[in-house]
Amino acid sequence: MKLIGRIFGNRKSPTPAEEPTPNTSEAGVRTTEERRLEALYQTMYADPELRMAIYDIRQMHARDGRVKKIHGRTARAMTKGGLRIEGASGKKRIHRLFADYVTRLGLNNRAKLESDARGCMMEGNLPMQWVVDQTGRVVKGVRMPTETIRPNVGENGQFVDPRVAYEQWDYLKGKAIAGFALWQMTLGRLSPGNIDDMGSMGRPYLDASREVWRKLTMTEEDLVIRRRERAPMRTAHFLEGATEEELDKYREQIEADQTQITTNFYSNRKGSVQAVQGDANLDQIADVAHLLDTFFSGAPAPKGLFGYVSDLNRDILDDLKQDFFDELDALQDTVAWVYEQGFRLDLLLRGINPDSYDFRVIFSERLTETLNQRADRGLKLQALGASRRTTWETAGLNPEEEIERLEDEADADSPYPSEHQIGGNGGTPSQPRISITPGNRRKGESGTSVSN
């Protein structure tokens, strides 16, 4: 199969006759002065500061189990449930094409989703190259290494030529080895300095915690060395009037006997043996605790969710978990937006205008609310008279799948009535009665009761 979009394509520079005409409607410079200087340097090579930050984060991930736990658990929580399409009500073709798109790109494999989500956190960017075959289908989404990608932008932060919007830089050769058109690569950025500046790359999630992590590991290593050197108890031997030869002979004898479990000391002259206790301040590790709290302040979740559960109130943990869920929702939106751009490209190549349909690609499980809370909110919307589609989407279900299942059940013509038909008039389904009691749940939330 011949691939039109290649992973490593040849760089194509426009001829002078093909130079794009500048847009005169966008006057002025919208970036800061330091960003303009960075853009000047980026015409020569990729961003070296971002490259070093990514290298440090990868080393932290490989050496420290805490960093690995942060990246791994966050990526698993983000991708739980997989992807789904929201909207395009009644457009079965769009939903069918999206299911085919997910299967074709391997997005139904959770390992692929976790890899992309973890890479977005560690690199701060998700550069996804779209590989297209001759039939006009996006057959693969390849996550490229961020530190080698250089946006081809000018001082105003806009692409100089959409035909070569991104370049891949080879540090060994010292030159760009591949060019990618704007449609060929989608760059999802995590907390960029300026979202309107296309050359402003995102930052790794733990970028601001790198310096604290260095201090934390250094202090922990110093603490271990201090314990090894100062924790054991020692003894001081005093022999009054002993010569140097007698003192050396006594030392050799005593040190030879120290290999035994119990050692007794004997002397034929006036002397004494005094115990010298170890460092009595080894339990004072407030500096380590401070650095640990400072490090986890930059993590998406409190340290209690990553194994440090001491002196943490349960109510406070519940509130901090809510902040964790908000962070996950923001990360989900960044990653899902990249997949949505690939699906829109797939529709365009098939001759379908994606702007004609109101849809968006999201992750199935939004962790801002629990499953019970989403179902509870869906029932409340149903009590307000919302449509079944709205109720199902709020509860986290796919309306198109639910409609197909209801149609299959109706076609089955089962002689046994469903639970919704029991108690109805003339075999027609009966609507459940929903009652809402304000202030009947934890933290002032309202309680929902459903009965037939």
Image (cartoon, helix red, strand yellow):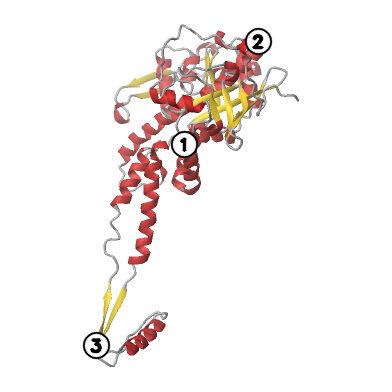
- Measured in 3D between alpha carbons, the distance from the residue under mark 1 to the one under mark 3, in whole angstroms, is 67 Å
- In the visual, does 7 lie left or right of 198? right
Residue at mark 2: 351
Q: Quadrant of the C terminus?
A: top left
- Measured in 3D between alpha carbons, the distance from the residue under mark 3 to the one under mark 2, in whole angstroms, is 102 Å
Residue found at the far top of this picture = 25
The disc at residue 74 is 1
Quadrant position of residue 330: top left
Is residue 355 visible from the viewing direction of this image? Answer: yes
Between circles 1 and 3, the one closer to the viewer is 3
Label 3: which secondary element:
loop
For the residue pair 38 and 263, the one nearer the viewer reads as 38
Q: Residue at x 32, y 29 (%)?
A: 441
Residue at mark 3: 240
Q: How many marks?
A: 3
Is residue 403 visible from the viewing direction of this image? Answer: no
Label 1: which secondary element:
helix
Amino acid identity at mark 1 = Thr
Image location (x, y in percent) of residue 124: 47, 32
Amino acid identity at mark 3 = Glu
Q: Residue at x 51, y 22 (%)?
A: 337
| Labels 2 and 1: the sequence-earlier one | 1
Label 2: which secondary element:
loop
Quadrant position of residue 37: top left
Image location (x, y in percent) of residue 11: 64, 24
Q: Quadrant of the N terminus?
A: top right
Image location (x, y in percent) of residue 263: 36, 82
Residue found at the far bottom of this picture = 268
- In the visual, does 204 lie left or right of 20? left
Amino acid identity at mark 2 = Gly
